[in-house]
């Protein structure tokens, strides 16, 4: 289990306390350990290092707690008015001022959703204000937060302007389909807003330079064409620098170098992964600075500044633009000090003397340290789930194989806890999305739940997934039930050929698109799988054209036609219309407040299976959405799911407690 650790650096290495040797294999964790809510969600150090601020779950609300580091005294406990309203995110915008974003439970749905409201409060709890948003606040709870206005817009922090202790830049999104977004300067005390610029393209995001000038805007038009625009300074005209209309390829700005002239761009290519290009905006010179052989880079920001790129190449690794910089040297030192762990710097003081470090892995939800760069000392602060014992979990290994058409497919294999994945009962866990989403290496609650109950777990980044370039992504276009499904089938057969799986004990399981692929898989390959489970899945594809949420905007309609397929072709790849081909037991679960995969998909799937005399168990949670949030519902759901797998694959039966752990 996690222990408080005080570590110091000697000769550039951290001397960490080691865990005592365990004489015997620890008992596998139960469901309760994985669904138990962490006491805090996020934590950041203040610019001076005087305070910590953290989001904390308290009595079904999420609040902001501020603690003085010198004596661990709570100086503020910030509640957003309304019994269904939560603190979602927060940012230190000065030494003592914090901006807070809100989320709210809508209707009967359990999971809170971002409202687009922004608040601000001092570190001592004073001067709490609703700055901007559409929610009219009339009551107060805890720290005083006063209502100011009611507007049909959503606001999101764009730049905290580190050199300005009063103002921030926000991205403002009107409540309309495919909106033209804008940037405004927001006074974090008065709420006064000043227009900065309006996007030249719909659905736009923005990038500022290191001085806070808005220099890039990129967005997606209603016909799905992506445009990237640039301007030399605030107040100047926007100029189009890239459109995907010509060849389907796009490029996106990531961040500026310290000179504010060179910008790093993520650039797509016809073949292979994306690259990073340094573009000198004065001379127009471009230079490729990073391109992996098969993996897309993603940005590494530290306090909002782009320092380098990460690569999820099996396991994550970091590449810095300047490997001799102080931050790169510190990062490498931390990597060496925590072998087997990934490292990220989550926040720092403005002088760089104190650094908050998170370490994590496939068997570690995350440990937090505060590192003193002057004293070369790291103090253990807390853990995300300090009741989780890494020794009682299973490691996740990268795998790869060739699909039937020769395409390289990557994924991950996790063994049952305490065993090697040899002739094991296997759950093929299919990710949602499907496009642009990918499984990666790290702690995954569902993977570990399944592994703890005796199953090997196979995750597949089938074509259409992210992380492997535009061509790989594009290969999934209109391949629902087609080549994307074949990749999952090929992965299953690979596991059998490698001796990983017992061919008679394999189940498909997934959420959203993963639920679709699980039911489609047993319809296409009725003799390959022993069972299937679908969680908040979509099963009737023609409804994308009738009453799906995507039909609310022109871009959503275009996406369905372009990426899912024409309406008249979708019945043939809809699992609920192929129920008579399914020969194995099925488990289904859905939420009554799900707007992404409405509950009617699961109801139609259940009805079709019963009509075809297929054994089916279906559970419904009326107040849940696209993924279950309430601990009681998660407990019930995983208990039923694991019992289903235990009956058909022979794993360990779940042990379910009656009430929450406190």
Image (cartoon, grey):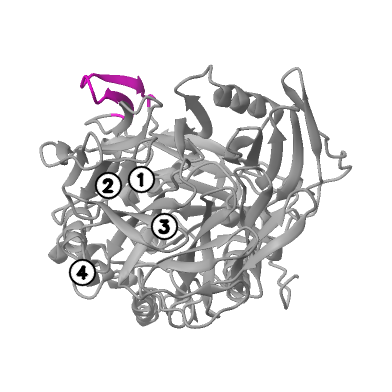
Residue occupied by mark 1: 465
Residue occupied by mark 2: 476
Q: CA distance from mark 2 to mark 3?
A: 45 Å
Question: Residue at (66%, 29%) from the top-left corner?
Answer: 334
For numbered disc 1, what is the local secondary structure?
Answer: loop
> Is 387 part of what is drawn in magenta?
no
Q: Name the mark nearer the viewer: 2 or 3.
A: 3
Q: Earlier in the sequence, mark 1 or mark 4?
A: 1
For numbered disc 2, what is the local secondary structure?
Answer: loop
Q: Earlier in the sequence, mark 2 or mark 3?
A: 3
Q: Are marks 2 and 1 in contact (CB under 8 Å)?
A: yes
Q: CA distance from mark 2 to mark 1?
A: 8 Å
Question: Residue at (32%, 49%) from the top-left corner?
Answer: 484
Residue occupied by mark 4: 551
For numbered disc 3, what is the local secondary structure?
Answer: strand
Q: Is residue 10 above or below residue 613?
A: above
**On the rendered structure, is 72 left or right of 246?**
right
């Amino acid at each position: 289990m996690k222990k408080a650790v005080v570590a110091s650096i000697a000769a550039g290495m951290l001397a960490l306390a080691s865990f005592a040797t365990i004489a015997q294999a620890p008992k596998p964790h139960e469901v309760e350990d994985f669904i138990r809510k962490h006491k805090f969600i996020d934590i950041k150090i203040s610019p001076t290092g005087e305070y910590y601020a953290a989001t904390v779950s308290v009595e079904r609300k999420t609040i902001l707690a501020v603690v003085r580091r010198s004596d661990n005294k709570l100086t503020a406990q910030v509640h957003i008015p309304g019994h269904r309203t939560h603190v979602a995110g927060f940012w230190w915008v000065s030494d003592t001022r914090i901006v807070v974003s809100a989320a709210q439970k809508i209707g009967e749905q359990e999971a809170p959703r971002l409202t687009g409201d922004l608040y601000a409060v001092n570190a001592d709890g004073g001067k709490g204000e609703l700055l901007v948003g559409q929610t009219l606040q009339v009551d107060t709870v805890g720290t005083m937060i006063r209502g100011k206005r009611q507007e049909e817009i959503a606001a999101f922090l764009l730049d905290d302007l580190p050199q300005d202790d009063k103002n921030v830049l926000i991205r403002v999104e009107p409540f309309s389909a495919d909106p033209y977004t804008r940037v405004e300067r927001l006074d974090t005390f008065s709420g006064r807003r000043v227009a900065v610029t309006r996007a030249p393209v719909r659905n736009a995001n923005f990038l500022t330079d290191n001085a806070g000038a808005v220099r890039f805007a990129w967005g997606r038009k209603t016909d799905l064409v992506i445009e990237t625009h640039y301007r030399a300074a605030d107040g100047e005209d926007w100029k189009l620098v890239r459109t995907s209309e010509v060849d389907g390829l796009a490029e996106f700005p990531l961040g500026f170098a310290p000179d504010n002239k060179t910008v790093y761009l993520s650039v797509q290519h016809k073949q292979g992964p994306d690259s990073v290009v340094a573009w000198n905006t004065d001379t127009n010179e471009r230079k490729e600075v990073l391109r992996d052989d098969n993996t897309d880079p993603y940005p590494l920001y530290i306090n909002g500044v782009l320092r380098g790129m990460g690569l999820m190449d099996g396991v994550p690794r970091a590449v810095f633009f300047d490997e001799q910089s102080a931050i790169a040297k510190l990062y490498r030192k931390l990597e060496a000090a925590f072998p087997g762990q990934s490292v990220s710097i989550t926040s720092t003081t403005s002088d760089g003397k104190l650094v908050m470090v998170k370490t994590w892995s496939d068997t570690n939800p995350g440990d937090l340290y505060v590192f003193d760069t002057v004293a070369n000392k790291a103090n253990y602060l807390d853990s995300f789930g300090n009741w989780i014992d890494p020794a009682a979990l299973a490691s996740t290994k990268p795998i790869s194989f060739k699909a039937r058409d020769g395409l390289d497919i990557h994924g991950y294999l996790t063994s049952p806890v305490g065993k090697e994945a040899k002739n094991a009962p296997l759950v093929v866990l299919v990710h949602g999305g499907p496009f642009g989403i990918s499984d990666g290496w790290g702690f995954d609650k569902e993977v570990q739940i399944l592994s703890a109950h005796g199953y090997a777990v196979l995750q597949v980044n089938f074509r259409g997934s992210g992380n492997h370039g535009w061509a790989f992504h594009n290969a999934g276009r209109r391949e629902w039930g087609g080549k994307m499904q074949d990749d999952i089938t090929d992965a299953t057969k690979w596991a059998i050929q490698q001796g990983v799986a017992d061919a008679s004990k394999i189940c498909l399981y997934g959420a959203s698109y993963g639920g679709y692929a699980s039911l489609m898989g047993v319809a296409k390959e009725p003799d390959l799988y022993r069972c299937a489970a679908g969680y908040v899945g979509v099963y009737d594809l023609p409804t994308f054209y009738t009453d799906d949420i995507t039909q609310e905007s022109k871009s959503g309609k275009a996406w369905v036609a372009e990426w899912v397929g024409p309406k008249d072709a979708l019945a043939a790849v809809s699992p609920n219309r192929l129920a008579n081909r399914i020969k194995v037991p099925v488990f289904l679960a859905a939420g009554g407040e799900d707007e992404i995969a409405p509950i009617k998909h699961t109801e139609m799937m259940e009805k079709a299976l019963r009509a075809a005399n297929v054994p089916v168990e279906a559970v419904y949670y009326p107040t849940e959405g696209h993924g279950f949030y309430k601990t009681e519902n998660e407990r019930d759901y995983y208990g039923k799911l694991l019992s289903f797998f235990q009956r058909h694959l022979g794993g360990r039966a779940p042990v379910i407690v009656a009430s929450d752990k406190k």
